Image (cartoon, rainbow, N blue to C red):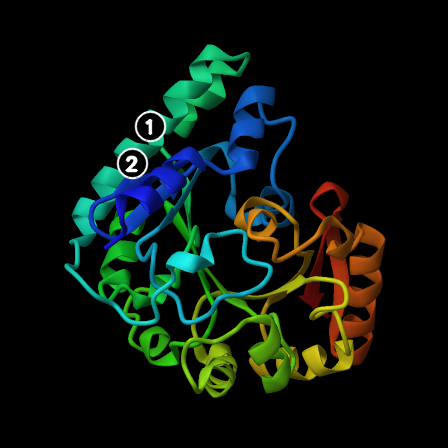
Amino acid sequence: MLNRETLNRLKKAGYKIVGNHSAVKLCLWTRKSIKTGEKEFCYKEKFYKDIGIKSHGCLQMTPALPFCTLRCAFCWRDTTITYPKWTGDIDEPEEIFEKAIKAQRELLTGLGGVPHSEKHLKEAMNPSNVAISLAGEPTFYEKLSQLIDVFHKRNIKTFLVTNGTLPERLEKLETLPTQLYVSLCSNSKEMMEKVQKPLIPDAWERLNKTLELFPNLKTRRVIRLTMVKGINMLEPEKYAKLIEKASPNFVEIKAGMAVGFARLQNRIKYEDMASHDEIKEFAEKIADAIDYKITDEKKDSRVVLLSKN
C-alpha cells in the first residue's frame, strides 16, 4: 500500500509498521513519563484520574494508517499518504494486538540506554491504556469492534478518536471504547472545506449525523477541538451549538501545534499556535454559551477541559 520512500520517511519519524495497515509510535509524554518516573505526564492522566490513565502505560496506535476522509491543515501526520477508501487486505484483530504490543516493546527498549525509571519502563512493557488515534481514521477498520474487545479482555482501557465522518461505523460498534472522542475542528461546512479539506463530498453532513447520535452511545464521550489562530479558532458560539447537539461528558479545547508533518509540510507556522491564555479565553466563551464549565487545564499542553455542570 505504501511505497518504500514513504515507509522510510515514517520509520525516521518513529513509526513502526504493524501488518498491512496498522502502526505504533511512542508518544512524547510516554517517553517523558518513563524518563522522569511519572513526574511529567500528559493532560489525559491529569484530566481523567478517575479511570486510571497512565502516560507511561499508553500504547499509541492506529489500525488504519493510510486511510482518512480528511486532510486537516493542523494534522501532525503525513496527509500526503491519505486515501479516502479502504484498499488491500484486512488483518485480524488478534494479529494487530500481538504485533502492536511487540512493536511497542521494541520502541521502549531504546529508552533503556538513557536515564529513566526502571519501574516505569518495566510497567510500560505491558500497556494499561491504548490511544487508537495515531494516524488515519480508525473507524475505517471494519473489525474495530473486535479489536476494542481484544484490548478490553487484556484489561487495557481504550480511547478511540474519530473525525466523525463515518457515523455508520460508530453505529455498528458492538463493543464501545472506554472513552470515545469526536474531533470537532470546524464550525461550518465552509470552514471544513477550507481547513480540513474533505476527500468525500458530504463530510460536514456526516459529521453532524455523528454529533446527533453521540448522546445515545453508552460510554464516556468527549468532543475535542483543535484550534489554530486565524484558521478555525473563530466564532465560539457556533462551536457551542454543535457541542450542545452532541451533549458530551467532556470537551477538550486544545491548541494546534506546528509539529511533525504539519510543520514539515508548511501547513502550520509557529505564529499560528494559540497560547494557553488564548485557548482558555476561547474555552470560556464556549462555556458561557452552554451548560459547561472549565474544570481543569494543563498549560504546557495548551489545553482546557470543560465538563457538564
Residue 15 occupies quadrant: top left
Q: CA distance from mark 2 to mark 1?
A: 6 Å
The residue located at (36%, 41%) in the rendering is: 24
Check the image and report above or below for 205 versus 82: below
Instruction: Provide the secondary structure element on which disc 2 rests.
Output: helix
The residue located at (29%, 76%) in the rendering is: 172
Amino acid under disc 2: Ile
Q: Residues within 10 Å of mark 1 (few under 14, many from 20)?
A: some
Which residue in the structure is indicated by mark 2?
A: 101
**Percent position of residue 248, x then y:** 58, 72
**Is 104 displayed left or right of 94 in the figure?**
right
**Is 108 displayed left or right of 27 in the figure?**
left
The residue located at (42%, 28%) in the rendering is: 124
Which residue in the structure is indicated by mark 1?
A: 105
**Is 95 displayed left or right of 46 in the figure?**
left
Amino acid under disc 1: Arg
**Is 51 displayed left or right of 19 in the figure?**
right
